[in-house]
Amino acid sequence: GYPEQIQSHFRSIEIWERGGDGRANGREGWLVKQLAGLGVDRFDAPGIYLGGTGNIFAGGKHYLGPHSIRKILSSKDQGISIDKSAVSARNPLLASIQQSQKNHNRRATSIASKLQADKTMFKVRGRQLGGQLRTVCNLISANVQIPVFKVTLGSFDTHVNQRNQHRNLLRELDEALTDTVAALKRIGVWDRVSIITYSEFGRRVAENGARGTDHGTAAPHFYLSGNVRGGIHGGMADLEKLKKGDLIFKTDYRSVFEFALRHHLRIDRNIFSEFRSIEA
């Protein structure tokens, strides 16, 4: 969790994806400056979001959206024609657009050629999550250089009839992640991959009047990798010690992101260094 928990969907997910808390928030996605420091030109793209919004990359350049790969494959040779005489007339805006389109075409061509050269097929279960993770596996298998992928599994806002809905969602999460880990092991990269789950908030402890739960504070999250020590990290929430009916969080979510930056991306001094507390 984080201090001064906000229980608005849009505000709280923005906090998680920009690295803030209920008192202050960042202006850009928490990964943007960290990835820029690694050198964007090293990658085909610094990141791609295949579901939900791209707020985690807000303010960055060259990031791809959920339909980018399909568009790249169908229109990789198409571009915007710009009158070079206008550019030569020192129009800075047109010059910037031309350079941006040139960079996009270069990246698109690289990604498309790699995908077309790799015919490996992967089976990842899950109606909502499976297709997104299958695309991730295809991109990794094709050696497309993208360091961060964001996927989404929605419908956890279980105000009504939570039991069956939550069970089905966790089954989909379990099956999709199980198949993804198997695929990554097959590719031979599992020790170099980290999978982190996050959500805008948890649920209240007590059931509401509709057999569901309402917006709460703290919640458990998963960190999967072939290169971490398994187990439970951080203290268990105390069900006997609540704050206005809500759990009191024991681990600041930014300490998890700090561990990922330091352990996975090898960025020892990072924007979350003050929250360093996890070793796994």
Image (tube, grey):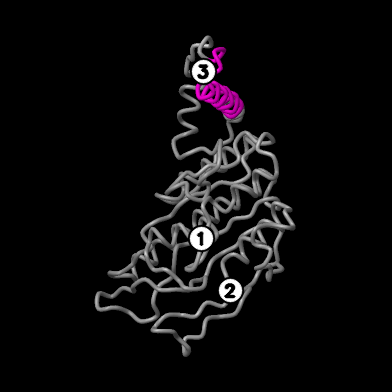
Viewer-side residue, 159 vs 191 = 159
Disc nearer the start of the sequence (2/3) = 3
The residue to which callout 2 is attached is 251
Q: Which residues are magenta?
A: 87-113
The residue to which callout 1 is attached is 25
User: Does the magenta segment cover residue 193?
Assistant: no
Q: Position of residue 57 (x, y in %)?
A: 53, 46
Farthest-out residue, front: 90
Q: Position of residue 209 (x, y in %)?
A: 25, 78
Write down the quadrant of residue 119 in the picture.
top right
Q: Residues within 10 Å of mark 2 (few under 14, many from 20)?
A: many
Q: Which mark is residue 90?
A: none
- 256 w.r.t. 241: above or below: above
Circle 3 SS class:
loop
Nearer the viewer's eye, disc 2 or disc 1?
A: 1
Circle 1 SS class:
loop
What whole-number distance in Å separates the C-alpha atoms at marks 2 and 3? 48 Å
Q: Residue at x 47, y 73 (%)?
A: 4
Q: Position of residue 158 (x, y in %)?
A: 33, 67
Write down the quadrant of residue 5 in the picture.
bottom left
Viewer-side residue, 73 vs 57 = 57
User: Does the magenta segment cover residue 106?
Assistant: yes
Farthest-out residue, bottom: 240
- 169 w.r.t. 54: above or below: below
Disc nearer the start of the sequence (2/1) = 1
Q: Residues within 10 Å of mark 1 (few under 14, many from 20)?
A: some
* Magenta stretch, main secondary structure class: helix
The residue to which callout 3 is attached is 77
- 39 w.r.t. 154: above or below: above
Q: Residues within 10 Å of mark 3 (few under 14, many from 20)?
A: few
**Residue kind at label 1, given as amino acid type:** Asn
What whole-number distance in Å separates the C-alpha atoms at marks 3 and 1? 40 Å
